[in-house]
Image: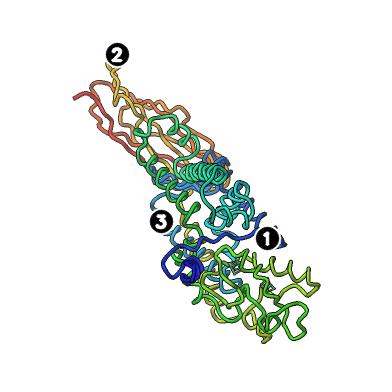
Amino acid sequence: MTEKAKFEKVASSLHSDGRRNYVQPADVKGRFATSRKGIFALLIGIYVLLPWVQIGGHPAVFLDIAARRFYLFGATFNAQDTFLLFFLLSGIGFALFVATAVFGRVWCGYACPQTVFLEGVFRRIERWIEGPRAKRIRRNAGPMNFDKFWRKTLKHIAFFLMSTTVAHIFISYFVSLPGLWKMMQESPLNNISAFLWVFILTGIMYFNFAWFREQMCVIICPYGRLQSVMTDLDTIIIGYDEGRGEPRGKKSDPDAGDCVDCGRCTAVCPTGIDIRNGLQLDCIGCAACVDACDEIMVKLKRKPGLVRYDSQHGLRGERKKFWRPRLALYGFLAAVGLVVAFFFGLQSHEEFEANLLRLGGTPYLVEDDGRIQNLFEIHVVNKKSKSHTYEIKPSTDDGLEYVIAIPNPTLKGGQGMRVPMFIYSSPSNTVDSIHLDVSQDDSDTVHKVSAPFLRPR
Ligand code: SF4
Ligand code: SF4
């Protein structure tokens, strides 16, 4: 018995001796493959371009964890808005439950970052460098030679560079693009935590996309495990029409079903499973097997759809129904999370934000005439969509001289502005803190901000 025969495959990615069964999916063409390519390109484009899009003076999505401020499409949230995030994430989570209950693992097959980057970027690079499935399998099984060496080396260099790029883009969502660019020009020691994050993320992505791959979906991802409790017999899944396909046999066999046992559906599967074995946890709903089998059916002049999107009831030829109690429940919870709770959360959200910041450098300056100067910046953010004018003024007459660069800034919706401010005190004044009121033209809300006034002791 050969070594190969001794160790049968026991799972899609595992042999019985624990060795990895490295899946080499074949290329596939078809309507779902084309749709997926379009969706991958769109999602990757959004991921790459979003940090460049500015709304109201900030990136469209900027999770400024250092300042505990989050900018999302013109709205500004801070650490006190965590409950909104909770409702938003809960709503999105339940909306995903609805999508899963209706369409099965549509998220996994079309929109999960793991699939988008693996299928849309890394596997494409692999195909460009190492060629189609048959060549890859043959080369991998063969001895190391110059051809194998340069292709593998080039592929891993490309994978590493791509992982680094994706990691840098990811970090830019937390530090902004100008922040990232500034960090890249400095020593890593000046921004050690950001540097470590990029380093770790690059390592994780390289490991995942170069080697771990489908095992992330099959072994690690909890969503894949949960799908069995979210789906039922009326969920649209990808399935094999057993009644039509069995018994398998040659085209010329009059007693055989439509499946000619060509194995094409298994060859294209990125998790290495055979869809004809029924609904499996390892199926990520990518529809590659649908395109593959349709191609065969067209060639055989048979009706496509032997492997297709359908419910388990549909595949068995039984009556299908759309509305089920679970759908109503998930839909209700998603609506509560997304619409009701988030809507009321936004209603109570602040109209604008004002923060007083001391500028870096010398804490105070003593002028030639003995006056003491402190330098501040007041950061005003319009959190609504319309333009507003703000008034910045001292709360009380404390005897200090306030020189505010723009005392009445007008800000567009979502815009923020940092207004510099010089504050002078006579040597005899002993006031040790400053207090300012910031108000908005059409609102009664007044934000009171204060900071210590520093002077020689
Ligand atoms: S591609 Fe279609 S015909 Fe070929 S093995 Fe799969 S189900 Fe059967
Ligand atoms: S069985 Fe079909 S749909 Fe499921 S992962 Fe494999 S190719 Fe994709």
User: What's the distance in space between the residues labelled 3 and 2, CA to CA?
Assistant: 49 Å
What label sits on residue 82 in the rendered view? 3
Residue 414 in view: no
Q: Nearer the viewer, mark 1 or mark 2?
A: 1
Instruction: Identify which amino acid the numbered label 1 is placed on.
Output: Val
Element type where label 1 sits in the image: loop
Question: Which circle's residue, 1 or 2, is located before the other in the chain?
Answer: 1
Q: Are marks 1 and 2 in contact (CB under 8 Å)?
A: no
Q: Identify the residue at horizontal 44%, vertical 63% (top origin).
A: 19
What label sits on residue 28 in the rendered view? 1
Placement of 72 over or under 228, stated as above or below: above
Q: Position of residue 369 (x, y in %)?
A: 29, 13
Q: Position of residue 452 (x, y in %)?
A: 28, 34
Element type where label 3 sits in the image: helix
Using a 10 Å C-alpha cutoff, classify the residue at mark 3 as few (fewer than 14 neighbours), some (14 to 19) or many (20 or more): few
Q: Identify the residue at horizontal 65%, vertical 85% (top origin).
A: 316
